[in-house]
Amino acid sequence: MVDVTFPKSLSSALPSEPMDGLPTVLQVIPNLETGGAERGTLDVAAGLRARGVRAVVTSAGGRMVRELERTGAEHVTLPMASKNPFVIRRNIGRLVELATARQAGLIHVRSRAPAWSARSAARQLGLPFVTTFHAPYNAGSALKRAYNGIMAAGDRIIAISEFVADHIARQYPDASERIVTIPRGIDARRFDPAAVSKDRMIKLARDWMLPDGAHVVMLPGRLTRWKGQAVLIEAMARLGRSDVVCLMVGDDQGRHAYHAELVALARARGLEGVIRLVGDCSDMPAAYALANVVVSASTDPEGFGRVPVEAQAMGRPVVATNHGGARETVLQGQTGWLVPPGNAEALAGALATTLDLDLAARARLAEIGRQHVLDTYTVDLMIARTLALYADLAGARHGRG
């Protein structure tokens, strides 16, 4: 894996002058609707603008475009979400034209279909090509493995966790020397218990009609089967406590049948008054502040997993499944507990342990958890490390370093 010297903070990575030899960075992503890859794209664009580098993002568009443009970055709408081979081929010329017009010094892509176009465009122009692996892609056939392999073709391959880095190295051994692990980061200024007012918490508690004095178990995440909501319902049935409310915070995104299935399961387990499917939440810091324990019950390993990190930043104990990125982000017995995926009995036991913590133990856990995030998983660190990688590639291209 590549040895890149990373600055410890964003401020140390952002001198007032632009990065030499890198007037523009072009980021390529299928769309800007929602998600971790999209959030990372916006964060890096903001970091580039803070350093005086022109930031251009091309995608098929989406609800996050306005937020991107507020950073001072430019968005160019192109059909980057298409998996049609003919569109992918035509996108090569579109990207060559865009990169040339904007004087791009580097192309960074975060998804497979547009990566095929972006790699060809970068090669035609002689530009450094960076990819980000956001997850361990499934490869059930040789054809699928070859399709996924474009993400291992970067001059630098960013893995968002050591779990993902290990996956890349196993699947594509020839890429090992080009892998750089840059964990995703969260905004620790936003996810800060000191920044959440009592009024925000009271409003949310009223909106959700939380009973006074109830302990709150919370699972944030969109309603989709692999996020493990059904496992948590089974765990709550085993927990058997009448003083607990379990909130599932997230939109079903049209998965109405799964939503109905969860409601039916809660009813069948006698938990109609305990399980609350509250939908999307626009104030997640206040939501975390209401929780006594935050759960990440994903049955498939997550490449990183923002929920455990956000919860720790808010000083909340975490119970997460023992695979994927959670093995790195959760400190077992210090900031939370890890349980086998899909094991409702183990999850219930970890919930009982966490809910029974006394105030002193909770205070210690909160302090350790927040410091762990500040030291390792802030958006400032993620931006600084990414820009350091860009600068390293730009310097190598111009014969420096």
Image (cartoon, grey):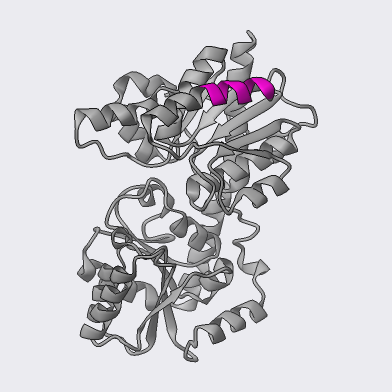
Where residue 139 appears, as percent x and y from the top left, is 24, 36
Magenta extent: 93-101
Task: Please say if 385 is above or below 254.
Answer: above
- In the picture, measured across the screen, residue 358 lies left or right of residue 400, that is left
Q: Residue furthest top?
A: 399
Q: Which of 269 and 356 is in front in this view?
A: 269
Q: Does residue 246 appear left or right of residue 194 in this picture?
A: left
x and y, in percent, of residue 269 in the image: 22, 83
> Which picture quadrant has residue 200?
bottom right
Given residues 296 and 75, the one toward you in this image is 75
- Numbered label tally: 0
Residue 9 falls left or right of residue 231 = right
Residue occupying image coordinates x 55% and y 48%: 39
The answer to whether residue 220 is above or below residue 77 is: below
Quarter occupied by residue 338:
bottom left
Note whether residue 158 is visible: no
Predominant SS of the magenta segment: helix
Q: Residue at x 62, y 48 (%)?
A: 65
Is residue 230 shown to the viewer in this render? Answer: yes
Q: In this view, does 236 lie to the left or right of 292?
A: left
Q: Where is residue 335 in the image (x, y as percent from the top left)?
A: 44, 60
Q: Residue at x 66, y 51 (%)?
A: 66
Comparing 95 with 216, the one in front is 95
Q: Determine the image quadrant of residue 203.
A: bottom right
